[in-house]
Amino acid sequence: MDVAAAREERPRRRWSGLLEERRVLAVVLIAPAIIYVLLVVGVPFAWAIYLSFTDAIGGSLSGNWVGLDNFRDVWSDPNFRTALENTLIVTFVNLLVDVSYTYLNPKVRFA
């Protein structure tokens, strides 16, 4: 009887059953994946946006703030305009071919 009484007298720890709750367990299990994605994707993406507003060149991670000047320069560049035009042409031709093939192919069933 003393063993049972000792178990009952012992105060229950506040955090002991915390991982048994679904709302806590879900956060604990998904947190490493979210942290990993933020580090692998988010940090380089944010750094690239920052660098696009500076005049950093050739792998240098420091530069002077130039704002939207880089985007104005690229938009006025004839090589960029040609590349953009070619990209849009290829994209729309591919879309037209894919949609035409889908509608003309009798084996394709629409759900």
Image (cartoon, rainbow, N blue to C red):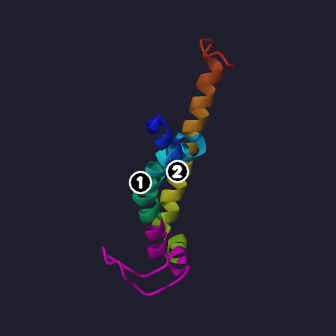
| Residue closer to the observer: 78 or 107 | 107
Question: SS class of the residue under badge 1?
Answer: helix
Q: Residues within 10 Å of mark 1 (few under 14, many from 20)?
A: few
Residue 90 visible in image? no
Residue 20 visible in image? yes
Q: Earlier in the sequence, mark 1 or mark 2?
A: 2
Residue 110 drawn in magenta:
no
Q: Which residue position is annotated with label 1? A: 36
Left or right: 70, with 103 as reference point:
left
Q: Which residue position is annotated with label 2? A: 11
Q: Magenta residues, as a range?
A: 46-72
Position above or below: 8 against 108? below
- Return the x and y of residue 104 as percentages of the image width and height: 63, 19
Q: Residue at x 51, y 44 (%)?
A: 19
Mark nearest the camera among 1 and 2 is 2
Disc ID at residue 105: none
Q: CA distance from mark 1 to mark 2?
A: 38 Å
Q: Residue at x 69, y 19 (%)?
A: 111
Left or right: 55, with 19 as reference point:
left
- Return the x and y of residue 58 as percentages of the image width and height: 30, 75
Question: SS class of the residue under badge 2?
Answer: loop
For badge 2, the amino acid type reads Pro
Position above or below: 41 against 89? below
| Residue closer to the observer: 49 or 12 | 12
- Return the x and y of residue 53 as percentages of the image width and height: 50, 78
Residue 71 drawn in magenta:
yes
Q: Residue at x 60, y 44 (%)?
A: 23
| Residue closer to the observer: 101 or 19 | 19
Instruction: Kindly give the residue lying farthest to the bottom in the view shown.
Output: 64
Instruction: Kindly give the residue lying farthest to the top in the view shown.
Output: 107
